[in-house]
Amino acid sequence: MHAYDTVSEALTDLKDRGYTTDFNIAFDKLECSTTRKCLYANDFEIVEHYRFEGESDPGDESVVYAIEQKSGTMKGVVVTAYGTYSEPVSDDMITKLSIQG
């Protein structure tokens, strides 16, 4: 696994390595921000993950996930906050993201 100092550094390198789809968590699925295609917990694997701690601001605490659709047709990233500022998600997504996050 790579080591990154910042979220933007991780996102740039992952994009260069083919993780080009930007996903957002939409409660029980990941939704592509441009195509609106969705992946449910059983549709994808977490290939890599990187946790960033906010040195001075807890709002900067986040996790970057490199995601691959099981069929191999889509690769992308999702960035989530953790702690107080985390997004509401379903139990299935919590389980999936906490396995490696």
Image (cartoon, grey):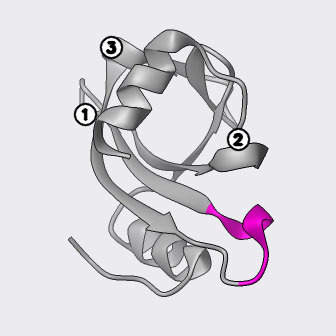
Residue 62 appears at what percent x and percent y? 60, 59
Q: Residue at 57% across / 72% down in the picture?
A: 53
What residue is pinned by disc 1? 72
Please tell me which of labels 2 and 1 falls first in the chain. 1
Could you classify mark 1 by the number of other residues whose Cα lies within 10 Å: few (under 14), some (14-19), or many (20 or more)?
A: few
Could you classify mark 2 by the number of other residues whose Cα lies within 10 Å: few (under 14), some (14-19), or many (20 or more)?
A: few
Q: In the image, which disc is placed on residue 17? A: none
Residue 47 appears at what percent x and percent y? 25, 48
Q: Nearer the viewer, residue 62 or 29?
A: 62
What residue is pinned by disc 2? 86
Q: In the image, what residue type sits under mark 1?
A: Gly
Per the rendered image, the range of residues in magenta is: 56-61
Kindly report which numbered mark, 2 or 1, lies closer to the viewer in this rendering.
2
Q: Nearer the viewer, residue 39 or 34?
A: 39
Please tell me which of labels 3 and 1 falls first in the chain. 3
Q: In the image, which disc is placed on residue 42? A: 3
Q: In the image, what residue type sits under mark 2?
A: Ser
Question: Could you tell me if the residues under marks 3 and 1 are in contact, i.e. CB atoms within 8 Å?
Answer: no
